[in-house]
Amino acid sequence: MAQLIDGKAIAARVRAEVKAEVEKLQAERGFVPGLAVVRVGEDPASKVYVTGKKKAAAEVGFNSWEHHVDASITQDELLALVGRLNDDPAVHGILVQLPLPKHIDAERVISAVKPEKDVDGFHPTNAGKLSLGKPGLVPCTPWGVMRMLEEVGVSPEGKRAVVVGRSNIVGKPMALMLLQANATVTVCHRKSDLPFEVGMADILVAAVGVPELIKGEWIKPGAVVIDVGMNRMPDGKLKGDVEFAAAKDRASFITPVPGGVGPMTIAMLMRNTLKAAKGE
Ligand code: NAD
């Protein structure tokens, strides 16, 4: 029976560390980090995420501002807002909550954020640095997964890691971070033989967005299973990408959904904002 990886508890620890560092920064350098969150329109999930981010920012002692604009905003107006935040010295981190309305080119907006304020780690410069193995701001969700592995004492070094999903915000950066940590990494997508590939994994990271796509019986006994999936079911409950009930009988460690990777993403956003503020 797998041991649960308690994302809530680890995330609380990360926030406490950030809070202590913010107090030190204020005492030594006389300022606190500032996080600006841009929310466009009325997407209900975005509202929930942004509320969570503002709450965490307040908890760790940051200044934070929400710029909530109407869905009818033009691309130029949104780019101008990002430009003002880029120029504001009190703002160390800028986050444009996705998704954006269809008439806006999200890639252009992401690329308009100064790379040193890109606390989501989505800017092409930061993505490039990650792929080159150079320091930069990295995407929060996979970074949170790396912290979870560290917390349970699982080193990726020499292990076979399998990442299911190849999105730019989770799957790809996840694969690069595991590679950087000396795992042998396989990245799966729709054309992959999932039962075979999943069966090879010492560390499995599922980031697909299909409820229970990954069957418990595919999982190698003793594997570490990290489920990034957050799928809202018709009954309102959240389900992961892994068939949890069956997987937990085979895995050595497993993350629950909810309460696993989810809380880590916001905690690592706080870490990234602190890093940006310190100019690291
Ligand atoms: P995405 O839709 O951008 O990417 C999904 C990836 O999965 C794609 O690369 C696609 O090739 C692959 N895929 C889709 N169907 C597949 C199939 N049947 N077999 C194999 N591969 C398949 O999604 P994303 O943004 O990477 O998010 C993935 C999941 O993680 C979603 O459930 C999302 O809600 C969740 N998520 C959670 C957090 C968090 O904080 N916990 C953060 C981001 C995303």
Image (cartoon, rainbow, N blue to C red):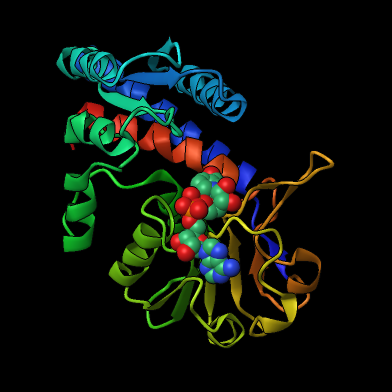
Residue 97, x across and y down, in percent: 43, 29
Image quadrant where one finds the C terminus: top left
Q: Residue at (35%, 38%) from the top-left corner?
A: 120
Residue 202, x across and y down, in percent: 53, 80
188 lies above or below 112: below
Q: Nearer the viewer, residue 110 or 163?
A: 110
Task: Give left or right: position of 165 versus 213.
Answer: left
Q: Is residue 279 in view from this perspective?
A: no
Residue 44, located in which quarter of the rendered image? top right
Residue 55, x across and y down, in percent: 54, 20
Residue at the outermost right position: 235
Residue 251, located in which quarter of the rendered image? bottom right
Q: Residue at (49%, 33%) from the top-left corner?
A: 15
Task: Give left or right: position of 28 versus 56.
Answer: left
Residue 17, x across and y down, in percent: 44, 35
Residue at the outermost front position: 103
Q: Nearer the viewer, residue 63 or 151?
A: 63
Q: Is residue 276 in view from this perspective?
A: yes
Q: Residue at (59%, 55%) from the top-left corner?
A: 209
